[in-house]
Amino acid sequence: MKLLKEFEYESDAETLIARLRRAGVLAVALNRGASNLSGATASAVKVAVWVVIDEQFDDAYELLRNKCHPVKNPLTEEQMVQLANEAAITHSSLPRYLMAAAVFSVALIVAAYLLLVL
């Protein structure tokens, strides 16, 4: 997983994630719920958008600059849902670092698959 961009507001991160998904790039936001914090603490916490599959990072970065950038190895929505289901571990059941580790593990499996297919 690679960090793509940080946002102050979760809604901005979700907008970017939706745009990336439409292009076939799997991304997630970490530090969700930071907007629920109060005062100065909330402004210090950022919502980070991570590209799950390292091989898709360059395409995701280019999509930040050019909304029409063609993604080299896009995933279908079905593939993204399948990956999410395989890593179906709720936030409440594990600390965030374990959730990130689970997503990272799935990303490694997908990366290996893409390397074998290409």
Image: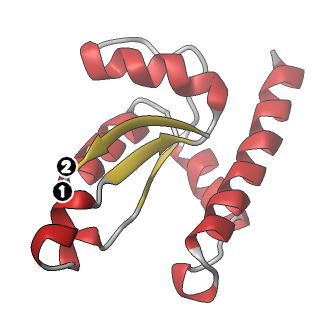
Which of the 4 quarters of the picture holds residue 32? bottom left
Q: Can residue 86 be seen in this view?
A: yes
Tag 2 near tag 1, CB within 8 Å: yes
Image spot of residue 36 (x, y percent): 20, 79
Q: How crowded is mark 2: few (under 14 residues within 10 Å), some or many (20 or more)?
A: few
Which part of the image, by quadrant, shows the N terminus? top right
Which residue reaches farthest left?
39
Residue at position x 70%, y 50% in the image: 104
Mark number, residue 35: none
Residue at position x 62%, y 66% in the image: 97
Q: Mark 2 points at which residue?
A: 12
Q: Which of marks 2 and 1 is in front?
A: 1
Image spot of residue 73 (x, y percent): 61, 21
Q: Is residue 67 visible?
A: no
Image spot of residue 86 (x, y percent): 73, 64
Per the model, the C-alpha gap separating discs 2 and 1 is: 6 Å
The residue type indicated by label 1 comes to Tyr
Q: Name the residue under label 1.
A: 9
